[in-house]
Amino acid sequence: MPENIDKRLDSHIVRVKVKGDYACFTRPDLKAERMSYPCMTPAAARGILDSILWKPEFKWWVRRILVLNKVQFVTIKRNEIDKKQSENPIIIEENSRVQRNSVVLKDVAYIIEASIYQDEPDAKNPPKKYTEMFERRVSKGQCFRRPYLGTREFDLEFFPVTGKEEGAKETVAIGSLFFDMHYDEKGIPGPIFCYGMKILNGVLELPEEENRRLMASSHRRPERKDGMKELLKFYADQEEAEHDL
């Protein structure tokens, strides 16, 4: 690991166990109907960690995800609408409602392992302060917002790791995996993908290169004059431009 990254990345690893009845970590390459990846994505893991503890002084570096239960898919029908969010509010009419199949995961459980990453190390706010804060919140079941497993209707429970958990010990090929969203200096978003990924003996190891790129993300939003309407239009235009390519 490069020396400059090593100084900013805490060596202590925090762990949290999450489980739920259903999960859907949607593959972006299959847009007509939702199909889940066979396990949690790094972006979903980071979202769960942020839900439990978020501070502007640090970012979460997700190291790996342990799959505790055997991968099981199930097909369900979900009510959706046939329009995308844009600058104008969506008016839901009867003819805009659609039922789509979703291939989701059933009976999931994971252990997320992550560390604190600080752009600027601060002696007054060392990583230990935040790791202990995180572990206290996990033990008490505290969170800033309720975390979920891919979509909001699939909520989860989280627990401290006891050390007695056993992984699924199965190997599942994933291929390309959505890692997270990266924002450049102008606040323009772009997806980060990693390739040749697989769950090996129940463990999804996350590559350092993509993590390092995510840590360099500005997470800046483009300037806007008309509030949320202009922001939504900006992202809709970006998606259309990427689709045309």
Image (spheres, rainbow, N blue to C red):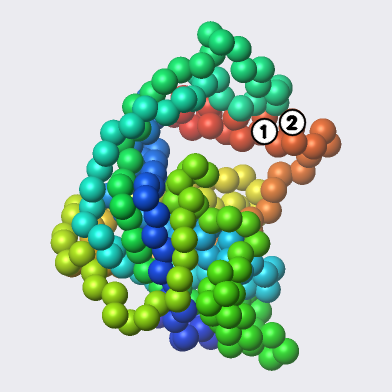
Quarter of the image with the N terminus is bottom left
Q: Position of residue 67 (x, y in %)?
A: 29, 63
Coordinates of residue 106 in the picture (x, y in percent): 30, 47
* Other residues around mark 2 within 10 Å, as few (<14) / some (14–19) / many (≥20): some
Q: Is residue 173 left or right of residue 207?
A: left
Q: Position of residue 44 (x, y in %)?
A: 46, 55
Q: Please name the residue that numbered disc 1 is placed on.
A: 232
Q: Quadrant of the C terminus?
A: top left
Identify which residue is drawn at 57% across, 46% down.
189
Q: Label 1: few (<14), some or many (≥20) within 10 Å?
A: some
32 lies above or below 130: above
The Cα–Cα distance between marks 2 and 1, rounded to whole angstroms, is 5 Å
In the figure, 230 relative to 39: above or below?
above
| Marks 2,1: beta carbons within 8 A | yes
Q: Is residue 60 visible?
A: yes
- The residue that mark 2 highlights is 229
**Residue positioned 58% across, 84% down in the render:** 132
Q: Residue furthest right?
A: 225
The amino acid on which the numbered mark 1 sits, given as a three-letter code, is Leu
* Tag 1 secondary structure: helix
**Does 149 appear above or below 61?**
above
- Front residue of 95 and 38: 95
Of residues 36 and 104, the one nearer the viewer is 104
Q: Looking at the picture, how far across and down is residue 158, in whole percent?
A: 47, 65
Q: Residue furthest bottom?
A: 123
Nearer to the camera, 121 or 67: 67
Q: Nearer the viewer, residue 95 or 178?
A: 95
On the picture, is 193 further left or further right than 103?
right
Amino acid carrying label 2: it is: Lys
